[in-house]
Image (cartoon, helix red, strand yellow):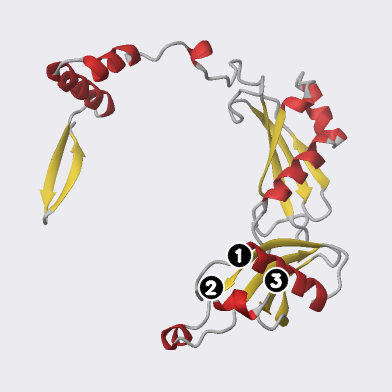
């Protein structure tokens, strides 16, 4: 990064796209050699408050969290954007950074290609694998892990009837697929309970659900009704939201809503 680009930015401004690209480039050139880096985050390393107060901030630094896929390790790095130098790079043991969006997509692809997962769906009578949604959720850390050194996620599955369905309306119960997110391979499939899919679809549109109760009357009243009609409508809405009635209790100059009953 040029000094002009850095100087014209406020010291606490988030990193710009060129700054993020520069930070990644610096780490790739000056950091440890690796055949595969997966960048989790590249953020501004905020300067000390004393430098801010004195107006002496000249360098902008980037703090980077990256997964070294080749060595199966997590690195934290600090780079100077002004000097284009790697200031620090340390391995963090016993931790895993948060999951990132590309891992979501790659995990779903790995699960859908797995023959054990496909066999589990076939046993439930599900043959249209393309209608499945697989989300990677945290595998947790409870002290009894079978794969303690792996970056694991548990893939949970849902089935949509169409592209317009709500994704999480029909879960495939009893099916959990554990995925190594670094190698993107399935390491275990748990299929111990077979529960039928919910019978109704997850397609919630006006055509399938029908008109909402009271919607037309409320819309007509709001657009052209009298003041009395609008007042009655507000009372009806409040009654639906708070069947026991709503009142306010005032204590120590703070008004807070209370429900009757």
Q: Secondary structure at mark 2?
A: loop
Mark 2 and mark 1: Cα distance apart in space: 9 Å
Identified at 84% across, 34% down, the residue is: 116
Report x, y in % for residue 248.
Answer: 14, 41
Nearest to N terminus: mark 1 or mark 3 = 1
Tag in front: 1 or 3: 1
Quarter holding the C terminus is: top left
| Residue at mark 1 | 16
| Residue at mark 2 | 9
Report x, y in % for residue 201.
Answer: 60, 18
- How crowded pointer 3 is (Cα within 10 Å; few <14, some 14-19, many 20+) is rated as many
Q: Secondary structure at mark 1?
A: loop
Quarter holding the N terminus is: bottom right
Identified at 63% across, 80% down, the residue is: 3
Q: Is residue 201 left or right of residue 252?
A: right
Q: Locate residue 155: give its quadrant.
A: top right
Q: Is residue 55 left or right of residue 45?
A: left
């Amino acid at each position: 990064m040029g000094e002009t680009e850095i100087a014209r930015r406020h010291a606490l401004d988030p990193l710009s796209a060129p700054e993020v690209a520069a930070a990644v480039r610096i780490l790739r050139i000056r950091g440890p050699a690796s055949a595969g880096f997966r960048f989790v985050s590249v953020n501004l390393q905020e300067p000390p408050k004393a430098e801010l107060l004195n107006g002496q901030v000249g360098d902008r630094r980037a703090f980077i969290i990256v997964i070294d896929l080749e060595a199966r390790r997590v690195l934290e790095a600090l780079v100077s954007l002004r000097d284009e130098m790697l200031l620090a790079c340390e391995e963090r043991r016993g931790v895993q950074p948060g999951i990132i969006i590309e891992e979501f997509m790659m995990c779903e692809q790995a699960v859908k290609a797995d023959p054990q997962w496909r066999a589990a769906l076939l046993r439930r009578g599900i043959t249209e694998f393309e209608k499945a949604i697989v989300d990677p959720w945290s595998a947790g850390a409870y002290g009894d892990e079978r794969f303690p050194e792996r970056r694991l996620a548990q893939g949970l599955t849902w089935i949509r009837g169409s592209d317009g369905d709500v994704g999480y309306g029909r879960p495939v119960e009893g099916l959990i697929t554990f995925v190594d997110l670094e190698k993107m391979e399935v390491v275990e499939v748990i299929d111990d309970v077979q529960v039928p899919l919910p019978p109704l679809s997850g397609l919630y549109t006006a055509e399938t659900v029908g008109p909402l109760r009271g919607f037309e009357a409320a819309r007509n009243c709001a657009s052209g009704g009298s003041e009395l009609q609008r007042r009655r409508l507000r009372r009806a809405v409040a009654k639906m939201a708070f069947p026991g009635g709503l009142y306010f209790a005032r204590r120590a100059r703070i008004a807070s809503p209370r429900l009757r009953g």
